[in-house]
Amino acid sequence: MSSNGAITPSSLSVKDLLWQVHWSKDRCTLCGRCAAVCPVHAIELGVHRLRSVQTPLGLVNSPSNSYQVYYGIRQKTDPAYGCIGCGMCNLVCPNDAIMPFKGDETDKLKFHINRGGQPRKRGGRRNVPEGVLDRIKFMRISMLTDPALDAGRHEFELRTLLGRVLPPEENLRLVREQGWIPPVREIYPLIIGSMSFGALSPNMWEGLQMGVAYLNEELGMPVCMATGEGGCPPRLLRSRFLKYTILQIASGYFGWDEIIHALPEMKEDPAAIEIKYGQGAKPGDGGLLMWYKVNKLIAAIRGVPPGVSLPSPPTHQTKYSIEEAVAKMIQSMYMAWGFRVPVYPKISGTSTALAVLNNLTRNPYAAGLAIDGEDGGTGAAFNISMNHMGHPIASNIRDCYLNLVKLGKQNEIPIFAGGGVGKNGNLAANAAALIMLGASGVQVGKYMMQAAAGCLGSESDRCNVCNIGLCPKGITSQDPRLYRRLDPEKVAERVVDVFLSFDTELKKIVAPLGRSTSLPIGMSDALGIDDYNAAERLQIKYVV
Amino acid sequence: MENNNQCCQIHGVENGHRIESRILEERIQKAVADGHRNLEVNAFGHHGIGGRLWSAGNEPVYVKVLGSSGQRTGSMGFPNTRIEVMGPTSDDIGWLNAGAEITVHGNATNGAANAMAQGKVYIDGNIGARGMTMTKHNPRFGAPELWVRGTVGDYFAEFMAGGIAVICGFEGQDPENVLGYRPCVGMVGGRIYFRGPHMGFSQADAKLAPISDADWEWLTSNLKLFLDRIGRAELFETFSKRDEWQMLLARTPAEKGGKTRRSMDGFRHDVWDAELGRGGLIGDLVDFDRSPVPVITSGFMRRFIPVWENHKYAAPCEASCPTGIPVQERWKLVREGRVEEALDLALAYTPFPATICGYLCPNLCMQGCSRGQVSMAPVDVTKLGKASIDAKLPELPPADGKRVAVIGAGPAGISVAWQLRQKGHDPVLYDMQGKLGGKISAAIPSSRIPVDVLQSELERIQKVIPRVNLQQKLSRDDIEQLKMDFDFIVIASGAQKPRMIPIPGKERLVTALDFLRASKLDAAKVGKRVVIIGAGNVGCDAASEAHRLGAEDITLIDIQEPASFGKERKEAEAAGAKFRWPVFTKAVTAEGVELKTGEVIPADTVILSIGDAPELDFVPESVVVERGFVRVDDFQRTSDPQIFAIGDAVKPGLLTDAIGAGRKAAQTIDDIATGKALQQRLRKVIDYSRVKLEYFDPRFVEFGSVAECGSQCSSCGSCRDCGVCSTICPRGAISKRETNGSFELVVDEDKCIGCGFCAGACPCGIWTLIENEPIG
């Protein structure tokens, strides 16, 4: 019921909303599917009164009024029910009678989405479509200058190393002296980045893991997936599939006692251990899994009672300095698996990354460094953190790599890049650009959600409700009514599709560069960009 | 021609110097143009020897190559040409061959027969990498052939698109692998016969096929020719063992499409679940089904379920009425044609349905009416109120409950006694006045309440409450006595003491209460000019009465904007009363009212109407009095557990407030008497947004009859059984279930998808959509 024009400062009209639902009376059959599927109740059945005045020509009779009632789909304007533009209404509409469209001006909801003094929180992405990675070109094309390779007919070994690679003389010395040599894994350079069991639904998580297992066991691609913070299902810990898994430990340490208890029963070592110090989407901020999301399943995996809120603090409590904290974390994690598993820290993109890296170069146990740039996604973060905090990945990786070059250690400590890789769908191009800027591999999260599970998010503030458990595709929800929409097998199939097509695309990039048996890590002479300043900053060629 | 058969010798070295390939080519072409058909070329690494000899037309040309042939010998060869290289040859032998027959008596290096389209290349030795690559078979001509006595190098037959290769594997470079490393990648046509072991080929592009009799016949007959050309006829025996030969064919596009990988379904079952256990990753942790469901679900898998919340919430009218009359239920009875029951229903809530609802009440129910939220006229309850004069009393239970003394027989006292009697208790009313009804009878002008209406209701009240003691001014001692004689006492003595202002000349003032009481008895007198200090509703009543009694110039003054409203204000205005504010009285004189400004408003009569206060000297010490009012809790209990208080003695209010307080006190007493826990019985009011008024005519402003009123009521919170929900439901999931005289609307959960259309359409706001019970 519209009020009598009494308004509050936050009274909005449909025009003020970012997403405006267009509904066609002519085509609607009132089947109810759109209203049933809308994750946020942004639409409802509306009762409408239509008035028509009959005035006879020539005024031969008295004019009269008649009213008619009709029903239609109406959009709510209360900020609590703002349309998120997911378009599920359109997906289920048999007649294409309903569709959300983006408003043509600044979203007014933005100014009012802080009721009770609570600033907006959301999941998803930064919603900035532009990025330097998409603009980087690969322009060192070998036709006659190098062996011209053919992505289709040549055999490629697109593998990367995860682990501390010692200089040959050092390695030989240790072999001779039967000393400890850091474990190194040969893995596929595209890693499924840390998304926790809890942030993702059980079906999504299982689908990703199943796809990874298939890639390893059926197709011989040594693909790894990181667990994210939130533990690891006990069965996975005790299966051979663990060797494809990078276990993450973060400030909340959820699920780690379960992992410790599983140690005696493990058939395989995990691929690696990732120590999370920061996340690109919300650098320097922690997380809180609200109590109502901690159902029995999540609780069992995280090793907590159900129905309690689970804070992941912004920092590890026992962290006092880089030297001390990183070193002791790395030591502890190595020790758990008898120094057989590579351990590396992951930080958010930051102008202080070099300080961390320099420290790691002096620590012979550091197996690598993962950096998550500002375009990284998240299950839940403050809008302000997502939109305005963080460091772009390209220059961060570049600085780190060039620093390693300066130290002569560029082949010794691998750097992994994450955050917005493939955010506009150009996964292989973005990955190759980062590799040639100096990354040994890339981590992707959102891309997998989109490509393997049909996540609706895009760089336009669409959907972005990962944080409230209402994911309409069942990707980030813990509600079986939602996540059962997602078939793990179909997710696994898509994971396989993604990796196979990525593999071909990556070959299409590296083959003309004359590379087939080693990744062109740091091969920046192949890169160019049509932005002079970016070229200067990244120390790549400026091309127009 | 004579020189036809003569051998024309062409030397690649002249005067001790190698001639350029261009010169050698010119000389070969010239020789052929000159009619030579038998050439012997002494090569010194020259390029492309023996190709392009079309100038001979159809006449065969034979080119023998001595020395070291260069790259691409026989390239672009024509069908008339036969080339014989007398030793090993360099790269790309027979490159882009278009028909020549080329024999090499030795090994050939990389790229043998690359891009060959017709003709034959016979190699008496091994070949290097990338042999037979990119070859084609043009249907206009015969298929090109490459014959190799030994083995081939790596990447053999890449992108082979046609033709036949025969690899004999005899005394080859790599006896363990006659086909080299990764043969047949990108092969789309042609066939390869080979003899001997291989180390794999591109399964995606080629396949092994059985050699048919026709194939074998072709192979053996052409094998003879090959061996004859390379001069190794003795090998025929060795090569004639059919079971030593294998054949590779290019896969057809259709066959390539059907690349076989294990299905994910199979992987899940045979690998994934086999390793992890039944139910996969978390099969040990959950006991519910995780199989896929559609987006639109019904039954247990619905995210939301509709709930029919009939009578759960109070309609805004009911909630706005301090008396608590469920007005919407009365209109429902009216719609059902049960008008008498609608009238009678009021008596369960108020002893004055006509006097108050019909006349004296500002009708808070109408102010609260949902219709008012969208500028529609509220349903007119005064019509129902006025008609309630005819309401019939319910049958009263025997008065064998508690004995309750009610002090004050005004609206509050009557209300509590009325309710107590209906609950089977035995109330006794005490009042110091000579008449029942308190201020309604004594002070409210008859212009506002017709005497017969009031009289009629008072008579009905007396039937219910026969025990009334009038003209009984009680003292504190009397109350102590009553406490002994009765189970409970209710103080309902109202506000009887007009407030005064301490100004000079205050003795000239007449209080409004005195004035109205006298006026009601027609015993009041006023001058022509009247000033009323205090412009509230009582002041307005005084103004109207003064006008009736002959006053001509009436002024109401107030220190602030007057609080008067409604009928009282309108009547005062109709009487020509002027309202002035803010003005401050300094004194009352013979001339009139002197203001602090010095101005004098002339007046013959000055009436003071700034409210009345309770007179509580009779109240025992056990009852706490605060700022002149009896202190009560939410249940109308005073600090003395035996004593209750209601009405203006507690807080100044409207008549309906007094009636409501009486009801509440009676309920409390009854609960205590029957040993029930005390509880607030108020239902939460329904949210306006749940009520849909689009079903009603917005231009409907004048209600003609009680029936018309009923038709325009949206019946907020109470189902009007209109059938809208069961009709709008897209799945036909809603039906009506009748149970002994009443009904409910029920949802078939197997049909319902939880769209909430029922809630969206319901005019009364009965349906709501709630989250389904969580799983897991």
Image (tube, coloured by chain):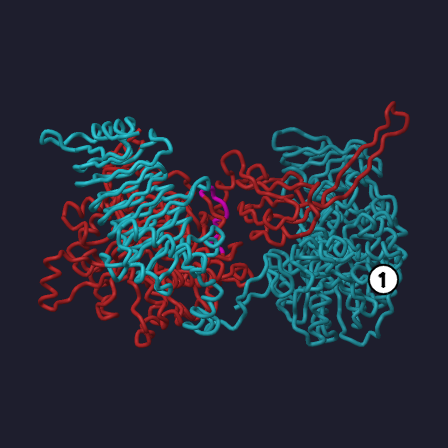
What are the residue bounds of the magenta stretch?
A459-468
Where residue B330 sits: x, y (%)?
A: 81, 56
Secondary structure under the numbered disc 1 in the rendered image: helix
Where residue A419 sits: x, y (%)?
A: 35, 48
Q: Left or right of B396: which side holds B80?
A: left
Q: Nearer the viewer, residue B260 or A223?
A: B260
Amino acid, disc 1:
Ile
Answer with the quarter of the image where residue A199 lies.
Answer: bottom left
* Placement of B606 over or under B329, stated as above or below: above
In reply to whether residue B379 is colored magenta, the answer given is: no
Q: Left or right of B179: which side holds A116?
A: right
Residue found 42% across the figure and 69% down from its top: B271
Q: Left or right of B720: which side holds A377?
A: left
- Residue A73 in view (yes/no): yes
Shown colour of chain B:
cyan
Where residue A504 sits: x, y (%)?
A: 37, 49
Q: Left or right of B603: which side holds B684?
A: left
- Residue A222 in view (yes/no): no
Which chain is home to disc 1?
B
Other-residue count near label 1 (Cα within 10 Å), few / some / many at <14 / 14–19 / ≥20: many
Residue that label 1 marks: B461
